[in-house]
Image (cartoon, rainbow, N blue to C red):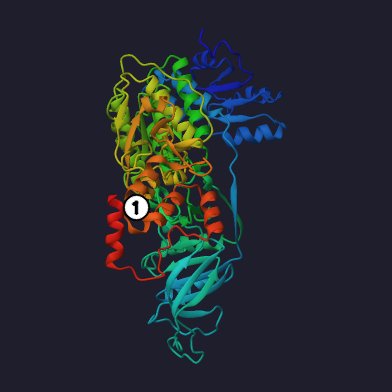
Amino acid sequence: MNEMARKPSPRRIFVCSCEKTMPNHGDTVAAASGASVAKADQLCRAQIALFRDALTGNAPITVGCTQEQPLFEEIAEDAGFSGEIAFANVRETAGWSRDARKAGPKTAALLAAAAIDMPPITTVAMESQGVALILGRDEAAIEAGRRLADHLDITVLVERGAEVLAPRQTVFPVLQGSVRNAVGHLGQFELTIDAYALPDPSSRERLRFGPARDGATSTCDLVIDLTGGRPLFPASDLRAGYLRADPRDPAAVAQMIFEAAQLVGTFDKPRYVDYDPAICAHSRSTITGCTRCLDLCPTGAITPDGDHVSIDAAICAGCGQCAGACPTGAAAYALPPADALTARVRVLLRTYAEAGGTQPVLLLHDNDHGAALIDAAARFGDGLPADVLPLAVNEITQVGPELLAAALAYGARSVRLLSRARPRHDLSGLQATLSMMDRVFNGLGYGAGCAELIEADDPDHLAEALVETGKPVASRNVSGFLPTAGKRGLMELAFRELHRVAPTPVARIALDRGAPFGGLAVDTDACTLCLACVSACPADALSDNPERPTLRFTESLCVQCGLCEATCPEDAIALVPQLDFDAWASPKKTIKEEEPHHCIECGAAFGTRASIDRVMAKLSDHWMFSGPEGEHRRRVLQMCEDCRVSVVVKESFDPHEADTRRVRTTDDYLREREARKH
């Protein structure tokens, strides 16, 4: 009996053959889950009493159907059920498949993963009073204004030279101008307008406009763009409150007008990313380090903000590329957090193995495109293979190295991410992650092609892409580690476990620059132990020793932000992108250590002996530090700060001040040179 079967679960699970169009695999589910499993052929109709009876208590329930989810939720609400109900799409992802008879382990895994609680979603409120600015070039903008005037507070701004008829009655303002700059989002747009001009009220046929001026400002809740030109914002289709259509396309304009009329009131938007500036590696002391999130954000929601960055939650569209690429976890995806998503992957893969499945393929997809394509494959094709486990995420671009590493450590033979054939937005961040992870997987013996993107819009193309999903490894150990909170800690744990259960573990894997892991090459001869790098390091990978001049390094903490490299005044540090598992397993490494210099007056330690000796050697031939006065200056430079100040105050002596009371002559220099000989 397996581990799961030994632990009875209070959960009630309902599996249905959907009118005998697929096997329900109830026995396999019961053995893998240890729960009470009810089998049905028409749970949503003839056998609905089975579900009603389960509502008498508050035990958690899982239903293997999503098509009739609204019906089951309505029945549960009417019955006053206060327990938890989870739903899993078994039919389209497992049952309606050419491999349906072999999909018992997969069915058990899908039901188990659906029951994992996800943290609640936090939201950002955006309020719109319906103040709308319509940008246009012709009568299409005026017509849109007429159709929206009963719903919104309309102002129309037409381009200079636009030919528009003079209205019989001024229902809404029609102005002239061109937008120089635009910022904001739904409820808080601000536009800077040049060539701004008011219409002449005496306009007869066409609107004539008066004197123009630059730099006018317009604030509004909505921007409706019918210019047909370049959009005002990057990734404009993701900017809440910015609606854009081709004025030559009546259907698109009508759809946009319908959407605009609804945008009045308060709207809750998910907060996709949680941000912790304390561990951000963007900048220190005006020196720029990590710019990964800034380089990847398609909407411009991320901007520099001193030593950190600022993420505007109202502009963020939730692609998650910032969180996927962030090496420290300062930007962390919240829908759901990485540890919660990894926990679901863990249950999915472990249950599949407990039910008798071996080395599955994890297929990550979104609900918008991926779920529809999988559904089409089940209805019109052969469906998904029995060893392909689909898991919906909000956006595939939210996936980072920690989830990919965890998936293979938990027993997946490969991971595939399903995208459109023509992605709407840049996937460069995700592609870089997949490229890095494929090198890691191949280096550890998991094989090439273990992490790849499937770009498909056709279910047949999806089926073809799933044929080559990595070959099973003959002998595979798997990990069962529990995910930890915090991306960086989870990433480190996942990679350690990935290495521990690897088919052919190696000590080191070289990576490309930009990877979130690596070491440092330090020129110890050039290093003066100024420890500027320690102050700059945002991840505490570099540290010192308060007892003596020491530079230490913890490679598992290094995020390769480059701040130490850029900060070092001696150019003694270079980044070495790599995965060095031996270094990760070792304690802090001492890179350089020297004896401290002790104050010749009070004995307090300060600086390093080598640095003081170098300074004294360089000053030995300088005329300011020769002779009796020079000797005194040399002694002062070997004192700690407190003793040096004491000497300066008591003796009115400045060790850096030259004797300027008389002009020095050649005789002075010759006399001092002769004195040094003796």
**What residue is shown at x 47% (from left), y 43% (from top)?**
538
Q: Is residue 424 visible?
A: no
What number of labels is visible? Answer: 1
| Residue reaching furthest to the bottom | 202
Q: Is residue 394 visible?
A: yes
Determine whether 389 is above or below 610 in the image. Answer: above
Q: Nearer the viewer, residue 41 or 115?
A: 115
**Dot 1 lies on which element?**
helix
Q: Nearer the viewer, residue 84 or 600?
A: 600
Determine whether 516 is above or below 57 in the image. Answer: below
- Counting from the top left corner in percent of width and height, residue 554 is at 42, 33
- Counting from the top left corner in percent of width and height, residue 178 is at 42, 76
| Residue that numbered label 1 is attached to | 619
**What residue is shown at x 40% (from left), y 55% (from top)?**
628
Estimate how packed mark 1 is, as few (under 14), some (14 to 19) or many (20 or more) residues with alpha carbons within 10 Å: some
Q: Amino acid at mark 1?
A: Leu
Kindly indicate the quadrant of the structure image that contains residue 194. Answer: bottom left
Kindly indicate the quadrant of the structure image that contains residue 358. Answer: top left
| Residue reaching furthest to the top | 1
**What residue is shown at x 33% (from left), y 46% (from top)?**
428
Determine whether 410 is above or below 511 in the image. Answer: above
- Counting from the top left corner in percent of width and height, residue 427 is at 35, 46
- Counting from the top left corner in percent of width and height, residue 118 is at 57, 34
Q: Nearer the viewer, residue 212 or 561?
A: 561
Q: Nearer the viewer, residue 661 or 507?
A: 661
